[in-house]
Amino acid sequence: MTNDPDANFSPAIQAFNRLLEVMAQLRSPQGCPWDKKQTHESLKACLLEETYEVLGAIDSKDARHLREELGDLLLQVVFHSQIASEAGEFNMETIIHNLVEKLTRRHPHVFGGEKIEQAEEAISRWEHIKAQEKQGQEGLFSGVPKELPALFRAFRIGGKASRVGFDWPQVEDIWKKAEEEIEEIRDAMVGENQQAIEEEWGDLFFTLAQVARRLKVNPEEALRISTEKFEQRLAFMEKKLLAAGIKLHEVSAAQWDSLWEEAKSFTESV
């Protein structure tokens, strides 16, 4: 018979309990000066950074890298839990209990007697149950954080509106709206009205986010990938020019075009 209280638990539970112990020790009077001074507010930037690093690890398709970054993201959850526990607000046990209870309640087709076959139907059912739970407490868009990147928030807001029936009938109708917004940008440019130009650009971006939503494309992710692709290609061009002793501002338009095509071929083959 062992005196270890975790002996009958799975290796994952034992490892998680050890993580909680390490975090508590880091925050203890004898712990790390940096860890002890952190607050929910001071850790916001860390949480955001770790989230984006997980996205980068997923894109890299490197399982070892993803494992490490998921660990760093988990650390942020444990960190916030420890801070709240010290303040007598909540702890990891209540976080997990609430999560399990919510997942069970919002999946009646898995843990109850309902039958759902399609993923879209499951999402709709989740939203319906969530709306019933929060009836009278929150508005339609209350579950969409204002801190989200603007393009992704536009995508989410449009999705919320669509689930209650407020949406364009066909994706072609959204395209027509986008074309109207482009014309309105041109009109604002003629009038040299900077405020109007910015407003019309916002309308265009919002409309394009809804096109992406109807095409089942995450616009934030699509833009991130395209920006990364552009960055890689320009870095390739810069490296080649510098190796040849050519300064970037000395390159002609024709040379840029030629280098761009070469960079496209190189990056697509990697």
Image: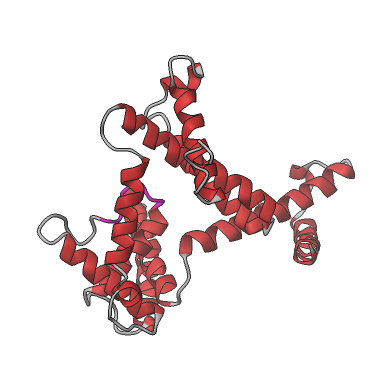
Q: Residue at x 78, y 60 (%)?
A: 263
Q: Who's the residue at 81% across and 46% down the image?
A: 239
When the figure is inspected, residue 125 is found, relative to residue 170, above or below; the finding is above
Image location (x, y in percent) of residue 159: 32, 69
State the image quarter where residue 139 is shown.
bottom left
Q: Quadrant of the C terminus?
A: bottom right
The majority secondary structure of the magenta stretch comes to: loop
Q: Is residue 82 magenta?
A: no
Q: Nearer the viewer, residue 163 or 202?
A: 163
Q: Is residue 191 visible?
A: no
Q: Is residue 79 above or below residue 199?
A: above
> What sort of colour scheme is used for the picture?
secondary structure
Q: Magenta part of the protein: which range?
A: 143-149
Q: Give the image location of residue 158, x and y in percent.
A: 31, 67
| Residue 224 seen by the camera | yes
From this view, report whether residue 38 is shown above or below residue 182.
Answer: above
Residue at the image position 43 percent from the left and 34 percent from the top: 79
Residue occupying image coordinates x 69% and y 55%: 62
**190, 244: nearer the viewer:** 244
- Most distant residue in the right direction: 244
- Looking at the image, residue 78 sits to the left or right of residue 195; the answer is right
From the viewer's side, name the closer residue of 125 and 18.
18
Instruction: Give how far across and how far down residue 150 sits, in percent.
Output: 38, 53
